[in-house]
Image (cartoon, rainbow, N blue to C red):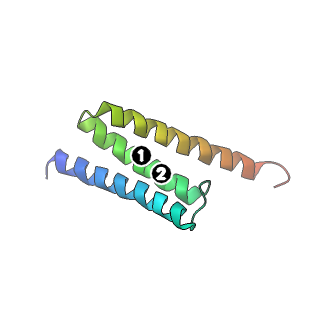
Amino acid sequence: MSIGIWVDVIGWLGALSVLVAYFMVSLGKWDGKSSSYQGFNLFGGACLILNTIFYRAYPSSLVNLVWVGIAIYTLVSMRKRDQAPGK
């Protein structure tokens, strides 16, 4: 199998992950600050970064890099909050 096929599969998994996260928040099943939501966004964004860099779609790569950065920032903030004394 060629690398292009693998990159396409990774891209589709990323797109599906981001869409599932959005769908679950829209249904009220997940909170926007839940680790599930942020984790799906992190995974999806990372997959989409690989896909868009491979295809040289750099504007989309930048958007997904910011998307991943927001997810990481939120997950780290949540972890710090949960580990704070008195929690």
Instruction: For the residues labelled 1 and 2, say whether their Cβ atoms are less than 8 Å apart.
Output: yes
The residue at 67%/49% (across/down) is 78
Q: Position of residue 9 (x, y in %)?
A: 25, 54
Find disc 1 in the rendering and name its residue: 45
Provide residue 59's location: percent of width, then percent of height. Answer: 34, 32
Front-most of residues 79 and 13:
13
| Cα separation between marks 1 and 2 | 6 Å
Mark 2 element type: helix
| Residue at image mark 2 | 41
Viewer-proximal residue, 44 or 83?
44
| Residue 18, picture quadrant | bottom left
Q: Is residue 22 left or right of residue 85?
A: left
Residue at x 41%, y 40% (from the top left corner): 64
- The numbered mark at residue 83 is none
Element on which disc 1 rests? helix
**Callout 2 environment at 10 Å: few (<14), some (14 to 19), or many (20+)?**
many
In percent of width and height, residue 22 lies at 47, 58
**Taking 32 as reference, is 5 left or right?**
left
> What x and y, as percent, mark residue 84?
79, 48
In this rendering, the answer to whether 62 lies above or below 31 is: above
Q: Quadrant of the C terminus?
A: bottom right
- The relative height of residue 27 versus residue 72 in the rendered view (above or below) is below
Q: Is residue 18 left or right of residue 30?
A: left
For badge 1, the amino acid type reads: Gly
Q: Residues within 10 Å of mark 1 (few under 14, many from 20)?
A: many
Image position of 72 (left or right of 14):
right
Residue type pointed to by label 2: Asn
